[in-house]
Image (cartoon, rainbow, N blue to C red):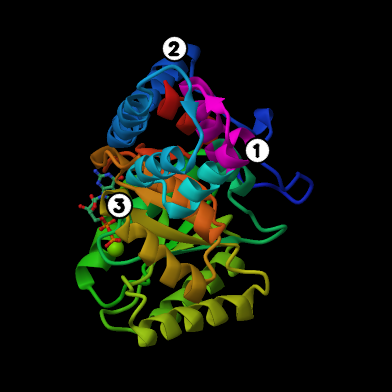
């Protein structure tokens, strides 16, 4: 597990340098690595099965002629893998332009699939953004039950262990239970929390949290929000209001707007991302509950179609169950 610390004014804005990272012992790291790759394998179970079994079935003889029939069969298999129509089209077009009228081996087909996916994911990859100076504000959005509050707790835990002073804002004021849930997490993590009375305006909580973060020199302020449906305009407007309240105090904040998606929701997660990324100006995705999903391939269309990097993946309900999303590991697990 790698911990990272908020960048200071003199430090670079890119990913953490090795001396910022406090690595666990080597054996812990190896065990961690092993656990991670087995998570990936499980999460990509169905995606893998489709990709490998069905593509293999396409090769009845050595080398397949790349004609319309082959391309449409291949396309149908790719679409089934949860990678989305857009990625399937990209791969089909790439094979078409390189092999049209010639024979293609299965290994070359899989190589192209791998290259296209790797490229699409890597081009979007970006580390968590931190403020140049003053507190970093992270706003967390997503529909009810997607895993927002749990992901906030995991992120706060990780940042706290990396040496940051973290302040939480319980902005999901519609449900008393949501405030309570975040309060319990804050006690476990050992960080401060700002909350309002039940039913108080979420903008007020955001205002007070950011104000406290500034005046008391916190490193990071993470704000929880109510579950929102993209069809509910009033909720989207409220989210915009929260952003205005934040940027009035810190002009370039929020520095991140993380959209939490439930990996078990499969393709539904994509339409959720559409509404939210537009209305909330999302900067990155946290894909929660990847441990309970076999359709991890959904990361590809999410990252691809919305131009949003997947910053973290949720691998369980405990504080340590948050991993950085690494495109290389993902592609490796997909083709292992
Ligand atoms: P919110 O309504 O978006 O704030 O969602 P919560 O954080 O309350 O999470 C909803 C449910 O999903 C809770 O029961 C969480 O424990 C569970 N959950 C959240 N993230 C994960 C994850 O990564 N893996 C698993 N297995 N469960 C998760
Ligand atoms: Mg919540």
The disc at residue 16 is 1
Q: CA distance from mark 2 to mark 1?
A: 22 Å
Q: Nearer the viewer, residue 190 or 45?
A: 45
The residue that label 2 is drawn on is 27
Could you tell me residue 202's position as x and y percent?
A: 39, 79
Could you tell me residue 5's position as x and y percent?
A: 59, 42
- Secondary structure under badge 2? helix
- Secondary structure under badge 1? loop
Residue mark closest to the camera, 1 vs 3: 3
Check contact, mark 1 vs mark 3: CB within 8 A. Answer: no
Could you tell me residue 262's position as x and y percent?
A: 31, 53
Crowding near the residue tagged with mark 2, few <14, some 14–19, many ≥20 C-alpha atoms within 10 Å:
few
The disc at residue 201 is none
The residue that label 3 is drawn on is 266
Residue mark closest to the camera, 2 vs 3: 3
Could you tell me residue 221's position as x and y percent?
A: 51, 61
What span is in magenta? 94-117
- Secondary structure under badge 3? loop
Examine the residues drawn in magenta and state their main secondary structure: helix
Question: Which of the two labelled residues, at mark 1 and mark 3, occupies the earlier sequence position?
Answer: 1
Q: Residue at x 32, y 44 (%)?
A: 80
Quadrant in the picture for residue 273: bottom left
Q: Residue at x 52, y 52 (%)?
A: 304
């Amino acid at each position: 597990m790698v911990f990272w610390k908020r960048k200071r004014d003199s430090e670079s804005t890119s990913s953490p340098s090795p001396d910022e990272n406090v690595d666990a012992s080597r054996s812990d790291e190896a065990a961690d690595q092993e656990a991670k790759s087995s998570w990936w394998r499980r999460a990509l179970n169905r995606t893998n099965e489709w990709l490998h079994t069905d593509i293999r079935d396409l090769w009845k003889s050595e080398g397949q002629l790349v004609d319309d029939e082959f391309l449409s069969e291949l396309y149908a298999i790719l679409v089934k893998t949860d990678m989305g129509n857009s990625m399937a089209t990209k791969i089909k077009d790439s094979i078409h332009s390189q092999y049209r009228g010639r024979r293609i081996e299965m290994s070359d087909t899989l190589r192209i699939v791998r290259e296209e996916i790797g490229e699409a994911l890597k081009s979007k990859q970006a580390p968590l953004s931190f403020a140049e100076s003053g507190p970093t504000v992270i706003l967390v959005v997503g529909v009810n039950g997607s895993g927002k509050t749990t992901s906030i707790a995991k992120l706060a835990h990780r940042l706290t262990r990396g040496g940051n002073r973290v302040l939480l804002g319980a902005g999901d004021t519609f449900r008393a239970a949501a405030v309570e849930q975040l309060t319990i997490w804050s006690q476990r993590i050992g960080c401060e929390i700002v909350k309002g009375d039940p039913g108080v305006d979420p903008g007020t909580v955001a205002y007070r949290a950011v104000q406290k973060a500034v005046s008391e020199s916190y490193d990071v302020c993470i704000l929880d929000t109510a579950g929102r449906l993209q069809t509910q305009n009033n909720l989207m407007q409220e989210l915009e209001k929260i952003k205005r309240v934040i940027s009035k105090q810190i002009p370039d904040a929020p520095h991140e707007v993380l959209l939490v998606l439930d990996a078990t929701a499969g393709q539904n997660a994509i339409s959720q991302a559409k509404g939210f990324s537009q209305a909330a100006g999302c900067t990155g995705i946290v894909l929660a509950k990847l441990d309970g999903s076999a359709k991890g391939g959904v990361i590809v269309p999410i990252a691809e179609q919305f131009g949003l990097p997947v910053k973290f993946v949720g691998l369980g309900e405990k504080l340590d169950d948050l991993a950085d999303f690494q495109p290389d590991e993902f592609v490796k697990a997909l083709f292992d």
